[in-house]
Amino acid sequence: MTELSPQVQGPEHDSVAFEDPAYRAAAVDLLGAITYGEISAFERLADDAKLAVELPDKLALAKMATIQFGHVEPLLERIAALGADPIEAMAPFVKPFDVFHAATAPSDWLEGLVKAYVGDGLAADFYVEIAAYLDAGTRQLIVDSLADAGHADFVVDRVRRAIENDHRVGGRLALWGRRLMGEALSQAQRVAAERDSLAALLAGGVDMPGMDLAALSRMFGRLTENHAARMAELGLAS
């Protein structure tokens, strides 16, 4: 998970979120995207559990899905506290997320594991980067919601074990990981560009410091580095 840059400081008091309509719109948009992302992750992990052959693996994936769904309620409550309707906040992100997941549907459970670890990890890094510009309470809620929750060890163990059993699996999953990287970055950029409030938040248009082109470049550099580290942890070439 990407750590927040100490140079980036959002508003430290919740009152800012309630007093600034532009800021509130940005916070609601980000929370809406993350909340629907958590719901999607829950659905995908539940489906992946059906593909697992061994009962311990089914149980592990079911537990991962349950943890993802457990993040939803606090996010919904935060959206409501900001004066927005949670369903309306999620609505703009339903189609983009569903299109992305349809385009990156795994062909087997190993691809599903890589997607959960690499694809979701990249998305989480991106959202945490944006959350650096939010108030402390909302920022911490987002960081907590996107935390790994301990399932990384399970995914790494299963993928590495599969590669040890058949080295050809490594090449296939490495290609899959690179595809996920490209699709996830494209989706993140598209979502940020299509939502004026998120674009303004990144650019500093809501009375925030924002990012210049150099800072944006460094951010995407960090995303790429984190992706490479995750791929290496899985035993895959990035």
Image (tube, grey):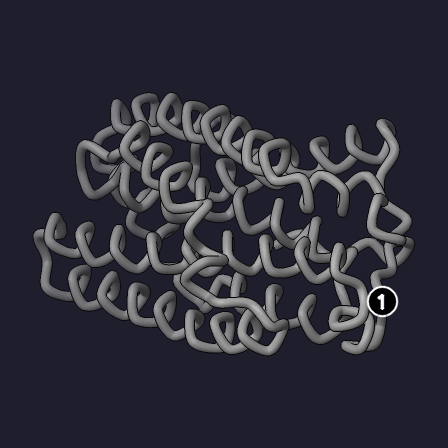
- Please say if 185 is above or below 9: above
Asked whether residue 51 is in view, the answer is yes
Q: Nearest the camera: 198 or 222?
A: 198
Mark 1 secondary-structure assignment: loop
Q: Residue at x 53, y 26 (%)?
A: 186
Q: Residue at x 76, y 42 (%)?
A: 200
- Please say if 5 is above or below 216: below
In the drawing, does residue 74 fall left or right of residue 105?
A: right
* Residue behind mark 1: 11
In the drawing, does residue 216 fall left or right of residue 229?
A: right
Q: Nearest the camera: 144 or 177?
A: 144
Q: Residue at x 80, y 64 (%)?
A: 20
**Where is residue 184 shown, x and y percent of the image?**
49, 33
Q: Residue at x 44, y 45 (%)?
A: 93
What number of labels is visible? Answer: 1
- Please say if 20 is above or below 70: above
**Where is residue 135 shown, x and y percent of the image?**
77, 68
Q: Quadrant of the N terminus?
A: bottom right
Under mark 1, the amino acid is Pro
Q: Nearest the camera: 15 or 115?
A: 15
In the drawing, does residue 20 fall left or right of residue 115?
A: right
In the drawing, does residue 96 fall left or right of residue 142?
A: left
**Where is residue 75 shown, x and y percent of the image?**
51, 70
Mark 1 Cα shell of 10 Å, populated few (<14), some (14-19), many (≥20):
some
Asked whether residue 160 is in view, the answer is no
**Where is residue 101 shown, x and y percent of the image?**
32, 37
